[in-house]
Amino acid sequence: MPTNNSTNPGATEIFRMPAADSTVPDLMGAHRPAHPTLTIVKGPQIGEVFELDAPQISLGRDPHNSVFLNDMTVSRHHARMDLGNIAAGYATIEDLGSLNGTWVDGAIATRATLKDGSTIQIGTFRMVFHTNARQRRIDTEA
């Protein structure tokens, strides 16, 4: 849980990773966009879906990020995703020296490979990455 940093208002707060939570719902349902997506399944913006339509995606608390995560447990410029290999079925994520780190599939990661269904924990946000390769395959077969 976040701890308050009263000596420096506006600073990123420390977040302690909670025990594993096996109740991650499928919030995507039947909707499958053409681009990869990041769905918030736990945290302040639960249910929000980000369609990742650029080769580089920035994640953080600064509103100018591609994925704006509005919580003090997230660093302003927390992580960056590279979608250059999405046609091969994966992407990568890199932590940008954040205070609380970036967790991928339950492990702290400086840099990690994301596959369809990978979970990402940034501060209080738990997100699920989807390549949406199945949807692209259906679109090309039609």
Image (cartoon, rainbow, N blue to C red):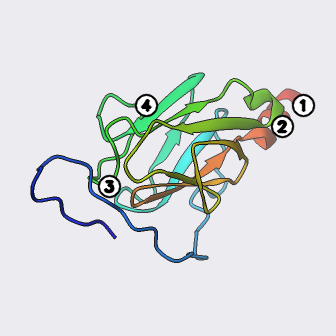
Q: Residues within 10 Å of mark 3 (few under 14, many from 20)?
A: many
Query: What amino acid type should be assigned to the residue bearing mark 1?
Result: Glu
- Which of the marked residues, 3 or 2, is nearer the chain's N terminus? 3
Query: What amino acid type should be assigned to the residue bearing mark 2?
Result: Ile
Q: Residues within 10 Å of mark 1 (few under 14, many from 20)?
A: few
* Distance of label 3 from label 1 (alpha carbons): 43 Å
Which element carries disc 1, helix, strand or loop? Answer: helix
Which element carries disc 3, helix, strand or loop? Answer: loop
Q: Position of residue 66 (x, y in %)?
A: 43, 31
* Distance of label 3 from label 2 (alpha carbons): 39 Å
Marking on residue 138:
2
Between residues 47 and 74, which one lies in front from this camera angle?
Answer: 74
Query: What amino acid type should be assigned to the residue bearing mark 4?
Result: Ser
Describe residue 103's horizontal placement relative to residue 2 as left or right. right
Marking on residue 141:
1
Mark whose residue sits in front, 3 or 2: 3
* Distance of label 4 from label 1 (alpha carbons): 31 Å
Quadrant of the rendering where the C terminus is positioned: top right
Q: Position of residue 55 (x, y in %)?
A: 60, 22
Rendered residue at 25%/66% (across/down): 3
Contact, mark 4 vs mark 3 (Cβ under 8 Å): no
Q: Which residue is mark 3?
A: 73
Rendered residue at 46%/73% (across/down): 18
Between residues 27 and 3, which one lies in front from this camera angle?
Answer: 3
* Distance of label 2 from label 4 (alpha carbons): 27 Å
Q: Which residue is mark 4?
A: 66
